[in-house]
Image (cartoon, rainbow, N blue to C red):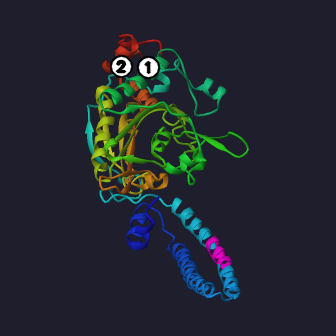
Amino acid sequence: MIDLNLIREDIDLVVRKLKSRGFDFDLKLFETLENKRKTIQVHTQELQQKRNEISKQIGLLKSKGEDASNLLEQVSKISDDSKKFESQLNKIQDEISSYLLSIPNLPHDSTPIGNSELENVVVRTWGDLPNFDFTVKDHVDLASHGLDFDLGAKLSGSRFVLMKGEIAQLHRAIGQFMLDIQTSEHGYEECCTPYLVNDQSLLGTGQLPKFEQDLFMTKKNDDERLYLIPTSEVPLTNIVRDEIISQNLLPLKFTAYTPCFRSEAGSYGKDTRGMIRQHQFDKVEMVQIVEPEKSYDALEEMVLHAENILKKLELPYQVVSLCTGDIGFSAAKTYDLEVWIPSQNKYREISSVSNCEDFQARRLKARYKSAEGKNILLHTLNGSGLAVGRTLVAILENYQQKDGSIKVPKALQNYLDGKELLTQI
C-alpha cells in the first residue's frame, strides 16, 4: 500500500507516477472521501471540545452543591452524536483503505518509463548461444516419455504435466541444486513453508484483493478460506507480518523450494504447448527483508544470486529492467532474467527479482526498531532463484544432442549419481 501521507502531501507526484504505469488515480473519488473525512473529524473535535467545556462546568456546579442535570443531559447527547460521527468516520476510513488497496506501488525513479514489455531495457547478456548442426526440437518432443501432458490432463486438466523417469530425476536435481546454492553460497535461511495460506497473508503481499481470480482457493470451513500459494514469496514475506524486528537481526534472508499454483486467468491461449505456463510448477524463492537505505543494494545482490545459478548451469541469458508498464503490482523496480530457449529462438523469463520498498511492509505492519528507538517500516524484496520447470526446459533444449539424448550440466552431475548423459527421456 502506498503512503497515504504522500498522497495528501504530493498528489501530483503520485498521479504522475501511477500514470506512468498505466494506472489512473481517481482524484475525484479520493478528494470526495478526504473532504468527508475532514468534515467529520472537525465535527468530532468540536464535540469533544464542547464536552470538555461542559464537563468543567459540571465539576464546578457539583463542587458548589448545585444541580447539574441539564448539563449532564447535554453531555449524554454529545456522546451519542460523537458515536454517530465515529461510526461515519470509520466507514469513510474503510472506504479510503479499500481504495488504497487497489492502487499499485509507485515506480522507482530508475525504472524505465514505458507502456509494455516492448519497452523493457536489456541491461546485460551472458553466455554464447548454442550452435546446432541439426534440426532443434522443443522440450515436448525431446522428452516425449518423461513429460506426459496427456496423463497430466487426464488427472487434473489442461496445463498440468506428470513427469517420469530421468526427467523427474532431473527436475528434482535442479531444485535441490538451486536450494543448496542459495543456502551454502548466498546465505539464505532455508524454510519449509505451508502451501496453503489465509487471506491476510495474500493481502499483505498484494495478491488480494485485486488478483483473487489468479489464485486457487479452498474452504477450510464455512467461514474461512485458504489459498494455494502462487509463490513462496507469500509465506516467506509474511514471516514479519505484525512484527517489530531488532535492527541487529537485519537483513533477513529466506529461501524455500515449493510448488506454486496459478490459475493463469489472464493467459488464455498463451504458451499452451509444454511447460512454460502451467497451473502448478516448482520454484526456489529468495526473499530479503532489509533496512530502507539498503534495499537497492539488496536488489542488485539478489539479481547476481539468480544469475549465479544460470552461470553454473552454463545457460545463456539476459538481464532486463522492466518498464513502468510491465512491473508487477507490488514492485517499485524489477529485473527479469530471461534464459535462451532454442526452439523459440528467443529469451524467456526464468526469474523476476523485485524491490517492493515499503509497499508490502505497510500492508503487513512489518517494522524494525532503529538505534534511536523508532519503529520504521521495512523494505521487502523477492525473486526467483529460479523457476525449476523453466530451468528444466532450458536445459533440455540447450543441451540436446543430435541423437535425442541430453547432456547433463556439470553442476548437476553429482545430483544424478554422476550421469553425464540422459538417454531414456
To which quarter of the image does residue 75 belong?
A: bottom right
**Would you say residue 81 sits in the magenta stretch?**
yes
Task: Using residue 421 as the reference point, say whether residue 275 is left or right of it.
Answer: right
Task: Provide residue 208's location: percent of width, then percent of height.
Answer: 56, 51
Rendered image: mark on residue 170: 1
**Any magenta on residue 397?**
no
- Which residues, given as a range, are shown in magenta? 79-87
Reply above or below: 386 against 93: above
SS at mark 2? helix
Residue 376 to residue 396: above or below: below
Q: CA distance from mark 2 to mark 1?
A: 8 Å
Q: Amino acid at mark 2?
A: Leu
Q: Which comes before the other along the chain, label 2 or label 1?
A: 1
Q: Quadrant of residue 349?
A: top left
Query: Is 24 left or right of 302, judged from the image as shown?
Result: right
Q: Are marks 2 and 1 in contact (CB under 8 Å)?
A: yes
Left or right side of 293 for 379: right
The answer to which image quadrant residue 156 occupies is top right
In the rendered image, which residue does mark 2 sit on?
412
Circle on res. 82: none
Q: Nearer the viewer, residue 84 or 121?
A: 84
Where is 268 relative to 15, above or below?
above
Label 2 CA crowd tier, 10 Å (few <14, some 14–19, many 20+): many
Q: Amino acid at mark 1?
A: Leu
Number of numbered labels in the structure image:
2
Q: Is residue 266 visible?
A: no
SS class, disc 1: helix
Q: Position of residue 325 (x, y in %)?
A: 42, 57
Q: Main secondary structure of the magenta part?
A: helix
Q: Nearer the viewer, residue 200 or 275?
A: 200
